Amino acid sequence: MVSSNPLFSGRWELTKWDSLNDIWPEMIFFTGVSVLVTLISTNVHNLGISSSLLTVLGTILGLVISFRTSSAYDRYWEGRRLWTTVILGSRTLASLIWIHPAPLLINEDQRKMERRLKATLEKKTMVGLVQAFSIAVKHFLRGEPGVYYEDLYPLISFLPRYSPTTGGGHVLSAIFSPSLEAPVLQRFRSGSVASRGTGHSAHASVTTIRLDIPNGAVPGIVAHADAKTSIPLDTLENGEVDLLPAQCPPRVRVYDYLPILYIFKPLVWLARKTLFLLKLRKDPSLDDDDRDAFGKKKRPEHLDGNVPLEICLYISSYLATVGRDGLVPPPTLGNLVTAVNSLQDAFASLERVATSPIPFAYQAHLRMFTWLYLIFLPFQLYPSFGYLTIPAQALATFLIVGLVEIGHEIENPFNYDANDLDLDAFCRQVAHELAQITAHSPPDPWEYIFNSENKPLAPGDTRSADMLVQSATTQAVGRALEDTRATLYKNFIDITQKHY
């Protein structure tokens, strides 16, 4: 018996049915075709044809759509599996870092409390980098370049490449150059590493934080923008940097609500081009290399490194340092390196999923095949269904086009669509678990094993561990060990008889 039905359990959300928003224009169009065919066949001339073509093409179309949907779901499931690897690797790496490495670069003559404080700060810093890795992967997969986000920049702002206190090595110093006539603005461009699909959201707000920039540091300028609207950010002269929110979905366009208007997009392009040519006649200065075909200023390409890879490099350098100084035994160091490698392997696989979409030729041919099938469908249905051809056509369009659209939606599961993977929830899970790990100092086993609350031999012997040790001092240790083994065997017999 099924414990719960996902279709009827929980709360229904219309956003989960966003594929309907994409297919309703096609449903109206093909239903209209069936209405036209039915009326003409009834009142003017019978347009019905043999259904043999329906049988042959229907079988082929079903196989092709099945392959398309299963391929898309495989990518969806692989993305979820790889994110599980990221979560597990982050949890393992943070636990090993928090427990094993000893303090770094601390002289033996320093006070014990100072050593413990520095060790705690060092470990918490590296655990913060582990948390930043999953967040950087999230932004990378969503095609959001840079590090200036509320959930990412505070975790890595101290790194040499991003810290203003490091002078010329800072990433912003490369943006603001005296040799340039004007600062080069980095821009945030919506769109995914692969094809983004349809995202829906309003433009995001901006948060400002203050940085401590010493005298002599080179100020820089950074800007983030949506695909259509830019948000210029203030310079760092006052030690401020503007951060985008953790979620930066693309703007909602009219094409998202009315996809059928895409057929008029070439006309819009032609009108804009004509308008620009008329402006160019009046102002020839608009014709330069820094403007596009419509006279708008060209946006420079965003030149930024692979942030997840950089984070792994810093973590690896930390592990190399503690290994070189003998602060971690070789077996533990091997486990740490293995955890870092698992994160890098999962990231490379996620990048492969995001940058390897199903070939466009296959998708275009499937779409045209589907449309042709639905256009000829009412001609084959009318001889058998009559006026019922109209609802039958609507139902067939809903089923066939809906399956094609679902495959297109889940092909890249890293975007902002309602049915995509919740990457923000994964990152929150990592942050919560790492905070739970660092909430307590690395425990000393002797502090909690030999106390009055631990009864390791229960139910056969309900004495606590400290009482068992004290009783062993009053009798032969060998006899106490034999009694312990006898109690453990008795517990095994009792559990076996009780459960089996």
Image: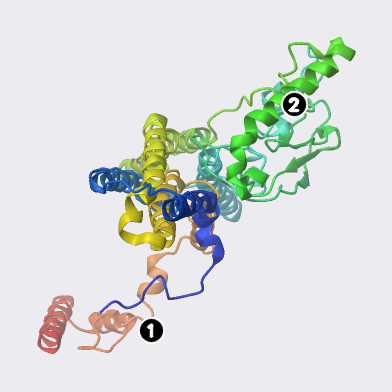
Its colouring scheme is: rainbow
Residue 349 x %, y %: 37, 38
User: From where the camera sits, is residue 152 visible?
Assistant: no
The residue pinned by badge 1 equals 452
- In the picture, measured across the screen, residue 437 lies left or right of residue 154, that is left
* Camera-nearest residue between 422 and 309: 422
* Camera-nearest residue between 287 and 442: 287
Residue 463 x %, y %: 29, 88
| Residue sitting farthest toward the right | 282
- Please tell me in which quadrant of the rendered image residue 446 appears: bottom left
Element at label 2: helix
- Residue 237 image label: none
The residue pinned by badge 2 equals 272
In percent of the image, x 44 and y 54: which residue is there?
Answer: 38
Residue 407 x %, y %: 40, 47
* Camera-nearest residue between 3 and 303: 3
- Density class for disc 2 (Cα within 10 Å; few <14, some 14-19, many ≥20) is some
Residue 471 drawn above or below residue 67: below
Point out the frontmost of discs 1 and 2: 2
- Please tell me in which quadrant of the rendered image residue 148 appears: top right
Residue 258 x %, y %: 62, 48
| Residue sitting farthest toward the front | 44
Give the quarter of the figure containing the N terminus. Answer: bottom left
In percent of the image, x 73 and y 32: which residue is there?
Answer: 164
| Amino acid type, label 1 | Ser
In percent of the image, x 54 and y 58: which residue is there?
Answer: 428
Upstream in sequence: badge 1 or badge 2: 2
